[in-house]
Image (spheres, rainbow, N blue to C red):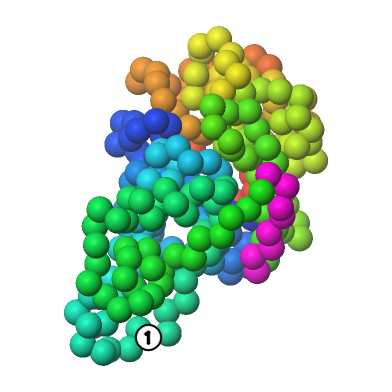
Amino acid sequence: MLQLQVMGNSGAGPFRGAACTGYVVSSAGTRILIDCGPGVATALSRAGVHLDAIFITHLHADHCFDLIPLAMSLRVQNGVSSGRILHGASDGGVQPIPVYMRPGGREIVQGIESFFPVRSAAPFASLTGGLLEFREWSDTEGVTVGALRVQPFPVQHSVPAVGMVISDSESRLAFTGDTGLFDGLVAACTGADAILSEASLIAKPSQRQHMSARDAGELAQRAGVDLLILTHFVEGGEDVEAQAMALAAERYTGKIVTTISSPTINLGEAVS
């Protein structure tokens, strides 16, 4: 059974104390992280989650900037320090976590790392070296990690970006990433049990690069899913959650929750 754990649900920057985008999807002992925005590394360390792979939807800071803090956290967890390596200590057989990113992602991370040199022997001579293994993937290249299958699809955003469908033998969860509403998005999400959808604009008019809560509701209705999970909040007052749910309900007749009040969701139970 697929389980969704919310590590962060804010867009652009931390919002009302919540980290930026980051979601752990798990099934049968396999755990993957979808996006790793600012604050997500802290949330992961607090939750004590072991990851089998990481998938980054696009190269905006609120979706990938905590990869370096995450690698430093992994160094501590695995006892990998500059001092240990310099003095010939074993690395303990640390297995790097694969990080699937669009072309150019590795270069961006390495550019940031270059400002913070590390005095260690290879492969730990950079902040992420030996802990994260960057792999490029395309808009259509599916990846299987343990019990999970991750199938990306292209979306409409200000930079090249993907959404994805994550599935196990029982359930399918579609994640929109950052995107406007378009027919291809509806087609990609059709057949899923639930959609984890951005609602960045809340009540603002639709744009090509982001969705409002109404757009998310329309997407869920047209795709015919059983559950709509609203996330990626950028703005709104104290009633942001209630407002987003009410606006989505104008166009969707199914069950609606948000990542604010539902930080952990078991899909099998939620859609039954």
User: Does 140 appear in magenta?
Assistant: yes
User: Does 92 appear in magenta?
Assistant: no
Q: Is residue 174 visible?
A: no
* Residue drawn at (32%, 56%) of the image: 113
| Quarter of the picture holding the N terminus | bottom right
Q: Vertically, is 21 above or below 74? A: above
Q: Vertically, is 7 above or below 200? A: below
Q: Is residue 177 visible?
A: yes
Viewer-closest of 6 and 109: 109
Image: magenta residue range? 139-146
User: Could you tell me which secondary element the residue under label 1 belongs to?
Assistant: loop
| Label 1: how many Cα within 10 Å (few below 14, some 14–19, many 20+) | few
Tell me the amino acid under the disc marked 1. Gly
Is 87 situated left or right of 48 in this image? left
Is 94 situated left or right of 33 in this image? left
* Secondary structure, magenta segment, majority class: loop
* Residue drawn at (49%, 38%) of the image: 259
Question: Which residue bears the numbered disc 1?
Answer: 92
Tell me residue 255's x, y (percent). 65, 31
The residue most toward the top is 205
Tell me residue 233's x, y (percent). 44, 28
Tell me residue 192's x, y (percent). 75, 42
Tell me residue 4's x, y (percent). 55, 50
* Residue drawn at (33%, 46%) of the image: 39
Is 247 situated left or right of 78 in this image? right
Viewer-closest of 205 and 100: 100
| Quarter of the picture holding the C terminus | top right
Tell me which corner region of the image, top left, top right, bottom left or bottom right, holds residue 86.
Answer: bottom left
